[in-house]
Amino acid sequence: MAFFIDDILLAPIKGIVWIAEKVRDMALEELEETPEKLQRELLDLQMALETEQITDEEYKKREEDILTRMEALRKKEGEK
């Protein structure tokens, strides 16, 4: 019976900890670069160019950055 009371009293704290862990996991996932995320960035960049939201010069600079990050990610995954 003591364990049941402990569970009831600790439930709010366990809930907050669970939420904090989920938020942390989502933040880490958002920060982590993946090939899919980089491809999506490249597609978004191409769409911005086609809809004239950015200039050719800005497109080339940002495209080069994305491709550099893709190459670094491939090398990093190749080392594993």
Image (tube, helix red, strand yellow):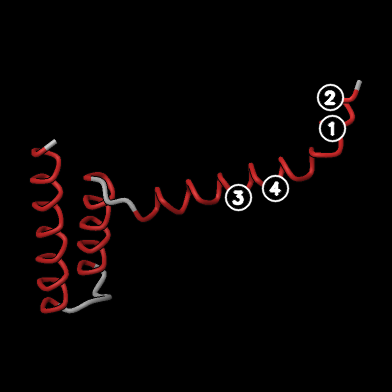
Three-letter residue code for mark 4: Ile
Could you say where residue 8 lies in the image, as x and y percent from the top left?
A: 86, 34
Q: Residue 71: image x %, image y %? A: 8, 52
Residue under label 3: 20
- Foreground mark, 2 or 4? 2
Residue 26 lies, with reference to residue 63, above or below; the image says above
Residue toward you, 45 or 32: 32
Q: Secondary structure at mark 4?
A: helix
Distance from Cα at disc 2 to Cα at disc 4? 20 Å
Q: Which mark is residue 3?
A: 2
- The kind of residue on which mark 3 rests is Ala
State the residue at coordinates (23%, 55%).
43
Residue 50 percent location from the top left of the image: 21, 66
Which amino acid type corresponds to the residue marked 2 in the rendered image?
Phe
Residue 79 appears in which quarter of the rendering? top left
Residue drawn at (89%, 30%) of the image: 5
Q: Residue furthest front?
A: 2
Q: Amino acid at mark 1?
A: Asp
Residue at image position (80%, 39%) is: 10
Rendered view: 19 above or below 58: above
Instruction: Residue 6: give its label.
Output: 1
Q: Residues within 10 Å of mark 3 (few under 14, many from 20)?
A: few
N-term mark: 2 or 3: 2
Disc 4 + disc 3, Cβ < 8 Å: yes
**Mark 4 or mark 2, which is nearer the start of the sequence?**
2
Q: What is the crowding at mark 4: few (fewer than 14 residues within 10 Å), some, or many (at least 20)?
A: few
Q: CA distance from mark 1 to mark 3?
A: 21 Å
**Quadrant of residue 69 within the rendered picture:** bottom left
Identify whether 63 is placed above or below 13: below
